[in-house]
Image: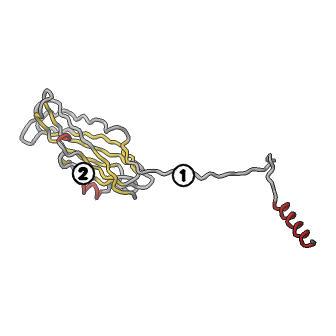
């Protein structure tokens, strides 16, 4: 009985000592913090800034040797490595037709493309990638970016400015018919890998 009483007294003392309830209302200098873990996953993003490049309106061809050229730039949002390819069909060739009929005449249509970054320390195309794709010089529409231009993503830089250049000329031994010549060039960004 003496041992039981001692054990009971010890248990009561331990309970009283370990029980330290928080006051229902804080007093001066009292505070209590609670944490909340937060997370979000960023998916792979390949997205042009808007709907399309702005239209390119070349100067008039006024002589056999005229070679008007112009460019537009457009931002590509990306957090991965991509490759840029182009439309190599006749849709990308400047073409003139009368009265909605068959194509009547075409111009020599050439393109170039460049980026504002070089892959390190900005997202863009390395000099080796530019050379490999042939985009360092004028290329006729049907061969433009047949070898895709590799864009290297650099961590913390999630955009690249892409500049599309176009040039129109007459054939070497010809003058094109008068009229408005139109083409549509499509640049497609395709995922190639994460870095």
Q: Quadrant of residue 175?
A: top left
Return the residue found at the far left. Answer: 173
Lower sequence index among marks 1 and 2: 1
Q: Which residue position is annotated with label 1? A: 39
Name the quarter where the N terminus is drawn: bottom right
Q: Around disc 1, counting alpha carbons within 10 Å, would you say few (fewer than 14), some (14 to 19), or many (20 or more)? A: few
Q: Around disc 2, counting alpha carbons within 10 Å, would you say few (fewer than 14), some (14 to 19), or many (20 or more)? A: many
Identify the residue at image location x=36%, y=57%.
Answer: 193
Return the residue found at the far front. Answer: 1
Q: Which residue position is annotated with label 2? A: 135
Identify the residue at image location x=81%, y=61%.
Answer: 18
Is 153 or 170 nearer to us in this picture? Answer: 153
Is 171 or 1 nearer to us in this picture? Answer: 1
Residue 92 percent coordinates (x, y): 20, 41
* CA gap, disc 1 and disc 2: 41 Å
Residue 57 percent coordinates (x, y): 24, 34
Q: Is residue 56 visible?
A: yes
* Foreground tag (1 vs 2): 1
Is 142 or 17 nearer to us in this picture? Answer: 17
Q: Is residue 17 left or right of residue 144?
A: right
Residue 186 vertical position relative to residue 4 in the rendered view, above or below:
above
Q: Quadrant of residue 21?
A: bottom right
Q: Is residue 57 left or right of residue 96?
A: right
Helix, strand or loop at label 2? It is: loop
Return the residue found at the far top. Answer: 99
């Amino acid at each position: 009985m003496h041992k039981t009483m001692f054990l009971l007294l010890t248990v009561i003392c331990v309970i009283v000592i370990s029980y330290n309830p928080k006051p229902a209302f804080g007093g001066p200098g009292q505070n209590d913090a609670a944490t909340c873990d937060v997370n979000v996953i960023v998916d792979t993003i390949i997205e042009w800034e808007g709907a399309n490049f702005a239209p390119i309106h070349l100067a008039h061809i006024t002589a056999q040797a005229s070679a008007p050229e112009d460019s537009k730039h457009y931002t590509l949002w990306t957090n991965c490595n991509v490759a840029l390819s182009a439309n190599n069909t006749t849709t990308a060739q400047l073409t003139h037709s009368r009265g909605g009929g068959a194509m009547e005449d075409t111009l020599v249509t050439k393109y170039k493309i460049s980026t504002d970054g070089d892959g390190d320390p900005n997202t863009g195309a390395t000099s080796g990638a530019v050379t490999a794709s042939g985009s360092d010089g004028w290329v006729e529409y049907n061969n433009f970016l047949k070898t895709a231009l590799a864009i290297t993503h650099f961590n913390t830089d999630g955009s690249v400015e892409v500049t599309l250049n176009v040039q129109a000329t007459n054939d070497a031994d010809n003058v094109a018919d008068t009229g408005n010549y139109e083409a549509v060039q499509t640049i497609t960004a395709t995922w190639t890998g994460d870095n």
